[in-house]
Image (cartoon, coloured by chain):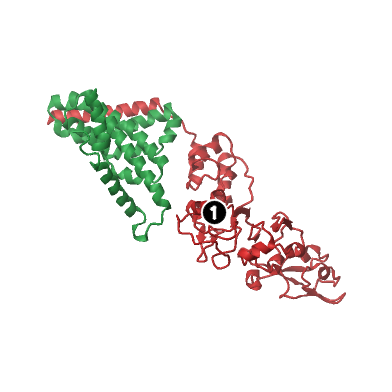
Amino acid sequence: MLIAIFCLSGLGLLASLGLGFVAKRFAVEVDPRVEAVERLLHGINCGACGYPSCSQFARAVVEQGVSAVGCVACGEDTAMAIAEVMGVEAVLAEKKVAVVLCKGGRGESATKFSYRGVEDCKAAVIVSGGDKACPYGCLGLGTCKRVCPFDAVVISENGLTVIDTERCTGCGICVKECPKGVIQLVPAGKEVSILCHSTEKGAEVRKKCEVGCIACETCVRVCPFDAIFMEGSLAVLDHERCRVCGLCIVRCPTHTIEGRDRVFPRVEIMADTCSGCGICSMICPVNAIEGEKKEVHQVSGERCVGCLLCIDRCPKEAIRIKAPADSTLGVASQ
Amino acid sequence: MVRLLLLIIGVVLVNNFVLTRFLGICPFLGVSKRTETALGMGMAVIFVMTVASIVTWIIQRAILTPFGIEYLQTVTFILVIASLVQLVEMVIQKMSPVLYQALGIYLPLITTNCAVLGVAVLNIQRDFTFVETAMFGFGASLGFTLALVLFSGLRERIALADVPRVFQGTAIALITAGLLSLAFMGFSGLVK
């Protein structure tokens, strides 16, 4: 009995002494700031920053002075908080979101054959580029959905990938994983996107898909800011120039261009400050402003698309955004 | 020499710890989703199991048997294994940060791996010599790693397959594990 007690407690003592000694002898000093930064990060280890885990990113932030903005997953608040820990000022990067540049679901686009293989885009692509007739189309088998660490990808009933922009952090993992290259990162504030990236001739696109870009160039002509240009047989949007007026959305004959659940604003003219100079009615791309010279002008709520060009140009600053904006362009175009 | 070789083959293929003795099922299901992590876990287990076999054998022969307190075997071995894993973790963290990062969270997980305790107890039950103990521990962990890596490869493929909804997740994993275990039964009789 005594021997047993002595032996066991002796062993325990020995083990704890050994551990204590080793812990002192082999102690690895960790910067307390590393822990502080790590606590602030989301800890989902998405890898979008280029480091394999959040803790390694935290170490890079502290030891190599990497900017906390490198973490795409955490928002502005976290970046600010980390910058505070580090005692530096945060320079914020523009938030981006992923957009699937394809609108042709199972209903709208033609198929070449019936695919019955492994339920994965990467596998489907091996079989002559997937079952869709359009070689650029989204296959909707969910490769991106499986890799998304934020559950921001939804496959619609139509067999099309839809990205929940609320949840999307713009980490770009789906962009890398998509075998079709159909996902693109766009500035979060610029809600308009041309949802087609097929460079085939217009007639070909029309045969394969109801909602593809047929290169009619209407959007190029209609854009008041020259933000859309043609790249071969595809209209491409320059997000730098885009002012999110939504004019192209209304005019696109195939409804290829979409504005992600943005509430497009409407403008109104304040009667007491308007001098009736007529500048606004001249520059309005949709002829939504009418009125006689020297008279108070009126905005037609139906025609206005909310490009806000007139607000910038009005010398009297008599035009303002109507609040609340009551309709979205997406609804208006349908 | 031939005896040692047979001992290793026996414990790796015929009496595989996971697939025949059903020890260490928890990490077998837990970390087998990706081959990469399975390999990391396997390496950590190989290291800890071999060292634990040796240390527990020494303790049994030097302390427990001479004092006639063999009934304390289980509690002593757990104490030894747990502190050993801690020790190894701290030393590796200091000596080789690269290896530490490669093994990652798997090292502390081994503390509660019943396969490690199983090896230590079996060594004593079978009355192995010192060299045999080391070889048995090494072989057992090798078998564990083999099973884990094979299984993770299967699971990676299953993840891409169109599994019926009722079987999705752990259910299909357990069925696969059963089939793998059946396959390993083919080795029975290879070594007496």
Q: Which residue is nearer to you in this view: B31 or A189? A: B31
Residue A297 percent coordinates (x, y): 81, 75
Query: Residue A133 at x, y = what percent?
Result: 58, 61
Task: Answer left or right for A201 relative to B118.
Answer: right
Along the line of sight, the residue nearer the viewer: A289 or A47: A47
* Residue A279 position in % (x across, y down): 84, 68
The residue nearer to you, when weighing A260 against A119, is A119
Element under label 1? Answer: loop
Residue A153 to residue A57: above or below: below
Toward the right, the furthest residue is A293
**Residue depicted at x 30% and y 52%:** B175
On screen, residue A222 versus residue B122, left or right, reads right
- Figure label count: 1
User: Which color has been applied to chain A in this rendered view?
Assistant: red
Provide residue A320's location: percent of width, then percent of height. 74, 68
What quarter of the picture does the N terminus of chain B occupy?
top left
For image coordinates 21% across by 33% down, the residue present is: B191
Q: Is residue A21 above or below residue A307?
A: above
Q: Quadrant of residue A82?
A: top right
Mark 1 packing: few (<14 Cα in 10 Å), some, or many (20+)? few
**Chain coloured green:** B
Is residue A256 at all visible to an observer of this figure?
Answer: no
Amino acid residing under circle 1: Ser
Disc 1: which residue = A128
User: In which chain is the residue bearing label 1?
Assistant: A
- Which quadrant of the structure image shows residue B161? bottom left
